[in-house]
Amino acid sequence: MVKAVVLGAAGGIGQPLSLLLKCNPLITELSLYDIVNTPGVAADLSHIATPAKVTGFLPPDEGLTKALTGAQVVIIPAGVPRKPGMTRDDLFKINAGIVEGLATGIATTAPKAFVLVISNPVNSTVPIVAEVFKKHNVFDPKRIFGVTTLDVVRASTFVAEIVGDLSKAPDVVVPVVGGHSGVTIVPLISQSSHPLPSGFSGEKLDALVNRIQFGGDEVVKAKDGAGSATLSMAYAGAEFAIKVVNALNGQKGIVAPSFVHLTADPAGGEALKKEIGADLEYFSAPVELGPDGVVKINSLGKITDAEKKLVDAAVPDLTKNIQTGIAFTKKSN
Ligand code: NAI
């Protein structure tokens, strides 16, 4: 019996994500909140023959509070997406306020819920959620997650393409660590479950890393002004959300990369900071999930010198992005 809530449910990501969640039999209640169109989306989904009872909410009449009451998992894809030429950081001005408002609703109505943040820039919006929760004295770092799964999904797909067998894509596991924008996205190709062909190194390897880091730009360019990744993001968001739901239901040993506050596992977080060589507050690393959220933050393990350079290159942007998020909430207090 799990109640999941999607905030921003009428959007390009929100609709297909809600569809995928509706298809999962473990979810018995699905609340959809947006500033527009949720009654229609909810009515449509409610005809699908799966267990979840679907309800749509709008801002009037305390819609956000009603949507969030009793929530165990809250997923946030609310906010504006990129257009060609924009970086994720360009979205900050609009999305920071949206995420802050929604986080306030969660902190006051469902403070124990797992919060999965999709809205960009994730490296900054996750700190915003955390700061709002701190302000309301309900901060639990084990329960706040930045969704970086799309980078992991892209890495699996692109590696399977190179291996020459797309049917292997669902089984390819490539840890992607760091953060979720540009050079902060660090794929650890050397740890791929499916090794690349011999001789796949140098420029070819650099191009693969670059494609994973900037894969989002391919979609933004192809959509030509109509937004960024929505369908692949919905797939990735649902994949991560279902892992969280399975962990909530007691399934053991679930590990997935996510952008988390490193005190979620103090010992693991400290060890990770030593590995990275920087005193970061947040980092995306493979985390083990349990019924109360993060159980363990895993180390990066054995990485190559080139991958260590990528980690080093990610640190300045990550530091800046995290600070931007924290400073925003301080300013708006
Ligand atoms: P969209 O514009 O299609 O949908 C956004 C939805 O949010 C709209 O329905 C809008 O009405 C709603 N919304 C706006 N303000 C709201 C508020 N205060 N409360 C509730 N809902 C509100 O955008 P799309 O394509 O669905 O993208 C959403 C976000 O996800 C963007 O910030 C985008 O950058 C991000 N994204 C994140 C990815 C990731 O890997 N984490 C990948 C792709 C996109």
Image (tube, rainbow, N blue to C red):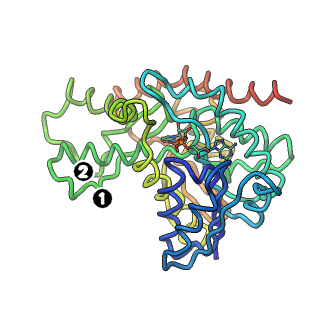
Amino acid type, mark 1: Asp
Residue drawn at point x = 31 percent, y = 32 percent: 211
Q: Residue 170 lies in what quarter of the image?
A: bottom left
Viewed as shown, does residue 217 lie left or right of 69? left
Viewed as shown, does residue 124 lie left or right of 194? right
Q: Which residue occupies the foreground of this view, 57 or 128? A: 57
Residue drawn at point x = 13 percent, y = 33 percent: 199
Q: CA distance from mark 1 to mark 2?
A: 9 Å
Compared with residue 86, is residue 60 higher up or lower down, i.e. above or below?
Answer: below
Amino acid type, mark 2: His
* Residues tagged 1 and 2 counted as in contact (Cβ below 8 A): yes
Residue 285 % position (x, y): 51, 43
Label for residue 194? 2
Label for residue 171? 1
- Please state, as top left, top right, bottom left or bottom right, where the C terminus lies in the image: top right
Is residue 294 among what the camera can see?
no
Residue 29 % position (x, y): 64, 72
Crowding near the residue tagged with mark 1, few <14, some 14–19, many ≥20 C-alpha atoms within 10 Å:
few
Residue 52 % position (x, y): 58, 74
Residue drawn at point x = 64 percent, y = 41 percent: 262
